[in-house]
Image: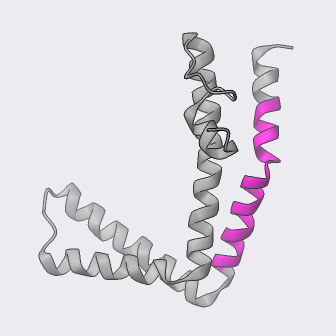
Amino acid sequence: MSILDKARELGQEIANSPELEAMRIAEVNMLNDPVSEKIIREFEDRQRVLHELHHQGKELSESQKKEVEEFEQKMLSNDLIVTYFKAQQEFEKILEAVNNIIAEAISGESQGCECGTSACCSSCGSH
C-alpha cells in the first residue's frame, strides 16, 4: 500500500470517527437553534470588526474589551454552543494526536507514551 493510499485510509478513519460525528451533530443542533444561531452570527460580525481594527493597527478600547468579555460569557452560557465547543476540542485532540504520531514517526523520537504522544495520552487516558 502506498503512502497516499494510507493517507486516504487515515482520512476515511478520521471522517468516520465518533469525535467528528459528535462535532457535526453538535454543530447542526447549535445552528438549528434560533438563539444559538443568532449568537454565532453576532460573534462572527464582531470578529470581523475586531479583525479590521487589528488590521488597521488599532487597539481595543476598554469598553470594547468589556464588550468582548460580556459576549464571551453570553456564548458560554448557551448549552448548545458549549456542547459544540467541547465536541470541537475533542476532535482537535484527535487531529493533534495524529499529527504528533506522524511527526514522531518522521523524526524517530517518541515521548515514551504507549500510544505515542502526550496528546494521544490525554485523549486515551493512558497517562
Check the image and report above or below for 3 versus 64.
above
Q: Position of residue 97 (x, y in %)?
A: 62, 36
Image quarter for residue 60? Answer: bottom left
In the visual, does 42 lie left or right of 54?
A: right
Tell me the quarter of the picture where residue 96 sits. Answer: top right
Between residues 118 and 102, which one lies in front from this camera angle? Answer: 118
* 76 in magenta: no
| Total tally of numbered discs in the picture | 0
The answer to whether 45 appears left or right of 109 in the picture is left
Per the rendered image, the range of residues in magenta is 9-31
* Residue positioned 29% across, 76% down in the render: 68
Residue 19 vs residue 82: left or right?
right
Q: Compared with residue 42, is residue 56 higher up or lower down, i.e. above or below?
A: above
Residue 100 x/y as whole percent: 57, 28
Position of residue 76 measured from the top left corner of the image (x, y, whole percent): 47, 77
Characterize the magenta stretch by its predominant secondary structure: helix
In the picture, which quadrant includes the C terminus?
Answer: top right
Q: Is residue 17 above or below residue 88?
A: above
Q: Residue at x 60, y 46 (%)?
A: 93
Residue 123 at x, y percent in the picture: 65, 45
The extreme front residue here reads: 127
Residue 70 vs 21, above or below: the answer is below
- 12 with respect to 103 (left or right): right
x 59%, y 81%: residue: 79
In the image shown, does 89 or 49 lie closer to the viewer?
89
Identity of the residue drawn at 36% across and 80% down? 71
- The outermost residue toward the bottom is 35
